Image (cartoon, helix red, strand yellow):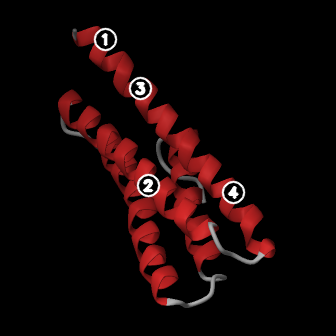
Amino acid sequence: MTAPGGELSERTYWFARDVRKAVNQLSRTLSVTEDSKQVIRSSGSVAANYLEAQEGMSRKDFFYRLKVCRKESRESQLWLELLAEDVDPSIAEELDRLIDEANQLTRIFSSIVKKQDESEG
């Protein structure tokens, strides 16, 4: 898939898609099921809000959406870390990669928001 908005749009799309694939490989205990639902929502929200930011009606709306992306990528990292605590080694590597990607996305969105805050401030 080629997402509108370039590389970051693609990264957020693939992140959401890869999270879904990874959680489908996990066991189905109550906590894993609930944490999986949470990370599916938050990772999808990163991609959806970035897509909406690209369509933003105003500069203010654009940066609001990026702040939501930052929040949701942090949340995704939390859920992924919880899921990674007790998993089969065959999926642990993929969860670690997704945790790293969530961290990188958080840093990217934080950097963009910080630059905006500094330019306004």
45 above or below 113?
below
The image quadrant of residue 34 is bottom left
107 above or below 111?
below
The mark that comes first in sequence, 3 or 1, is: 3
- Residue pointed to by mark 2: 47
- Residue pointed to by mark 1: 118
Indicate the position of residue 44 as horizontal and vertical percent values: 42, 63
Q: Residue furthest front?
A: 86
Indicate the position of residue 118 as horizontal and vertical percent values: 31, 11
Q: The residue under label 3 is which amino acid type? A: Ile
Q: Residues within 10 Å of mark 2 (few under 14, many from 20)?
A: many
Q: The residue under label 2 is which amino acid type? A: Ala
- Give residue 96's mark: 4
- Residue pointed to by mark 3: 112
Q: Residues within 10 Å of mark 1 (few under 14, many from 20)?
A: few
CA–CA distance between discs 2 and 3?
16 Å
The mark that comes first in sequence, 2 or 4, is: 2
Q: The residue under label 4 is which amino acid type? A: Asp
